[in-house]
Amino acid sequence: MIIVFLLFLLFLFCPSENPEPGVMTTKPKLCYFCGRGRMESIRWLLAAAGVEFEEEFIETTEQYEKLQKDGRLLFGQVPMVEIDGMVLTQTRAILSYLAAKYDLYGKDLKETVRINMYADGTLDLMMMTAQAAFKPSEEKEENLTLIVKKAKTRYFPAFEKILNDHGEDFLVGNKFSWADIQLLEAILMVEELDASVLSDFPLLKAFKARISNIPTIKKFLQPGSPRKPPPDSHYVEVVRGILQF
Amino acid sequence: MTTKPKLCYFCGRGRMESIRWLLAAAGVESIDGRLLFGQVPMVEIDGMVLTQTRAILSYLAAKYDLYGKDLKETVRINMYADGTLDLMMMTAQAAFKPSEEKEENLTLIVKKAKTRYFPAFEKILNDHGEDFLVGNKFSWADIQLLEAILMVEELDASVLSDFPLLKAFKARISNIPTIKKFLQPGSPRKPPPDSHYVEVVRGILQF
């Protein structure tokens, strides 16, 4: 009986793919491990857009296997986001959808492609950082040094130039967009590895201060927000255990 | 005068191949001749210099009306295309692994195709019974899936044996005139990476 009752509660609180018409708009629901990984950029985007969301944290192998068996993970992988009656996977697909939905994607295709270029680059950089946590400890130090180097020689100079060339407050179209959110997230992530990384980039320093002060982002940067801390050994252990690698 | 898009990359598949497929399927000619993050692929088109593979692909898909009729269709196309891109990138990168690891890698790719990706697509086609993956209309997702199927078949010719709908899909999409043309010798389509290609790229990118 208890199992039936629990299943009933689960059914109530985990909406199916197609809620009935007239049902009140539910908050987006994020399904991932309790850490940054590939979900953090999605949290940033939603937070910056002022959208409240719920999170289901995957903590056991059983939970993960159930998600796969229930067929909610298209290719058996997370991140997964339930939003607007859909079950979405694939990080970039989710991010693009949210950027468009919350009007953070430029005014036309030419602005959108620039936002995508910049966001793709920062995502690459942040994914290197996320993956470094899972390398053997001998390689980790080397990896993190390489990430800081790439930030300082490949990515940050490019963004410093973009800001310098147009002299505007935001990366694209003189308007706050997903690209700005991504760049701030990346800057903060690399600063956690090397606090002086922006020393040669005055425009990025100003950008960082400016974007951090946007009310929704300022709120996200405060303790108690859904923002997750850098991966520690416990997080790595949990994820390794569940994904079995 | 509209200039043809210009693709700048190594002379091989790598991260440019999906872009060649999309342009070919859309019937757009391009010639093989400023790199934002110092990386290729790079495509010059519509007065812009574009880099970042997915950014380029999304732009082309939207420009050539291969991206669905609304945001909900677009996100599905993106989900499917992202998955197939992941699979194809594994294959592209396998060529650069040490020879002891390569065999193992290619076996893993075929396994992932047969257990993770192809079952998902077989189910999608089965569930709606339509000819194309999204919205009953030819889209970028269909191009990507065909490219991925052919790529995995190069590793294991029997990989579609348990996927009848994908077999039919493959035949159907291959017969679309622009794609049929791209599949013929002499098109911009590139061969699988061989040791010469790997040597050239390693030499230039220094790794």
Image (cartoon, coloured by chain):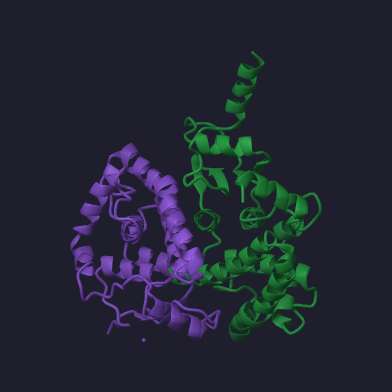
Chain colours: A green, B purple
**Residue B72 at least partly seen:** no
The image shows residue A1, relative to residue B108, as above or below, that is: above
Q: Position of residue B143 (x, y in %)?
A: 32, 59
Say whether residue A174 is visible: yes
| B84 versus A76 height, above or below | below
State the image coordinates of residue A228 (x, y, percent, origin top left): 73, 53
* Depth order, front residue of B121/A221: B121
Left or right of A34 on screen, residue A114:
left
Residue drawn 63% across and 19% down? Answer: A3
Q: Residue at x 67, y 68 (%)?
A: A186
Residue A70 position, x and y percent, is 51, 34
* Picture quadrant where residue A233 is located: bottom right
In the drawing, does residue B206 fall left or right of residue A215? left
In this rendering, would B160 be left or right of A81? left
Where B27 sits versus A9, above or below? Answer: below
Q: Name the outermost residue toward the front.
A: B100
Query: Which residue is more in the foreground, B189 or A118?
Result: B189
Judged left or right of residue A215, residue B171 is: left
- The residue drawn where x is 64% and y is 44% is A242
